[in-house]
Amino acid sequence: MNPPRALVGTARLLRFTWAERMVHRTTAALMLVCIVTAAILYNGNLAIRFGHRHLIELVHVYCGLALPVPMLLGLLSHAYRADLSRLNRFTRSDWRWLRRRTRRDAASAVGKFNAGQKVNAWLSCGAILVLLGTGVIMFFVDLAPLAWRTGATFVHDWFALGVGLLVLGHIYKASRDAEARRGMRRGTVDARWAAAEHPAWAADDPAGSARAEPAHGVDPADEQ
Amino acid sequence: MRRAHPRGVSDEQRPSGSPVGRRVILGLLGLGAVGVVTGRAVESGLEKVLGPIEVRDPTGLIALLPAGDSFRFYSVTGAVRHADPATYRLSVSGLVDRPRAYSLADLNALPQVSLTRDFHCVTGWQVLQVPWQGVRLADLIDRAGPQRTATAVRFHSFDGTYTESLTLAQARRDDVIVALQMQGGPITHNHGGPVRMYVAPMYGYKSTKWLSGIELTAEVEPGYWEHRGYPVDGWIGR
């Protein structure tokens, strides 16, 4: 069942369902373990201080292999798939939003995700898949010739650097918006915050969703 | 992703805009694949560009970039004690007639050989043209007088855990040395000093760091990483 997007009688809108929050939480935990272990494996001083290369490598590899699993499980959730569809699509106003310095001029068209969030989602997803593939080549040394393992190491290093910067930027942006964090932690956001940050999403008559009326022609057979 | 749920995307009415997300993800996958195949060449080009800048970089930030051509430091135990060069001993023992413990001075007094080779890790990273210097392992073996039953050499590390092995024939190659210097100076602790193996024709895991003992044995005993899946014969390129 898909819970209603807005809670009736409150000024809070449902932004992320339980399934989506779990995907985010487990992905975040796995990603953080990957980053910490990566730092130990990569930095010479840390590597010598912590030692235990094989153990740290195994933790890194298993967390890395597990990284896409929450996202794949998320596909079982209707809300998650709907958000993927939102993230996938880029409109003319998204381009405008990215170009505008203040972001305000084009803000009225911002839906559930702004253009920056969309770009972050694509880059994170693509980079995680590249890191997974190159990591597999490096770990299972019989899979590919040495030259490819060298190339895989090279790609893995640079994409890891990129993902590290993405995660830092993601945490920085979250640190500046308590309501956005609350939305990801508890699922609901203040309606006024939604109207300011994601007006097109907020204006989409959450009360209508709460009443669960087929305002946009919901086919019951299509419900989960 | 494509079959958007009407209500799910209701705030955008219908899936409007282009599926840029999918294109970016596929593009990144393509870039990654090209990088795997061409990375070795790209890396050496990048190293030529960044190398000279890195030397003059006052912030040290460029050294943090994965520009390639730098060692990664592997240690399989907790903190490894630092060996005092004055009291360091390398034992040659096992199936030999004349077991012996060499001090660093003893090793330095033996005939030295130099070789400059590429260092390859089995996982793929590499450092090109590393100069090494030390004593040929064959010389130490000959001095010890191997017994007829000895067919292999086992290496011990003073980290207390790491071991490696070579067949006696492999150990007698000219490009297998007990290294005392690398890159023009004494071998630092992080590189496995004061004394480490350097088995030039094989992957890095065959070159035991923090070398403490050379033991002649009746057969090859798989070493630390070989118990964890790497081939016993670690020839580079295979």
Image (cartoon, rainbow, N blue to C red):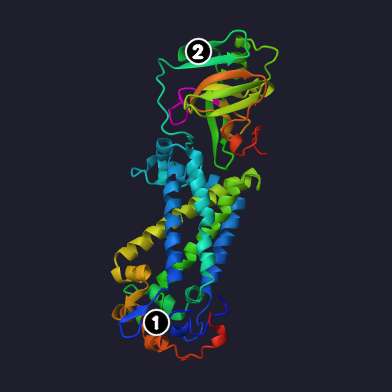
Marks 2 and 1, how far apart at CA: 76 Å
Circles 2 and 1, Cβ within 8 Å, touching? The answer is no
Determine the residue positioned at 31% across, 74% down. A102
Q: In the image, which residues are magenta?
A: B185-197
Q: Secondary structure at mark 1?
A: helix
Amino acid type, mark 1: Trp
Amino acid type, mark 2: Tyr
What residue is pinned by disc 1? A201
| Main SS of residues in magenta | loop
The reply to whether residue A128 is in sight is yes
What residue is pinned by disc 2? B102
Whole-percent x and y of residue A14? 38, 78
Residue A71 vs B17, above or below: the answer is: above
- Quarter holding residue B169: top right
Whole-percent x and y of residue B43? 54, 47
Q: Is residue B187 found inside the magenta-colored segment of the image?
A: yes
Q: Read off the chain for label 1.
A: A
Position of B174 with respect to A26 (left or right) is right
Crowding near the residue tagged with mark 2, few <14, some 14–19, many ≥20 C-alpha atoms within 10 Å: some
Position of A120 with respect to B100 (left or right) is left
Whole-percent x and y of residue B5? 53, 82
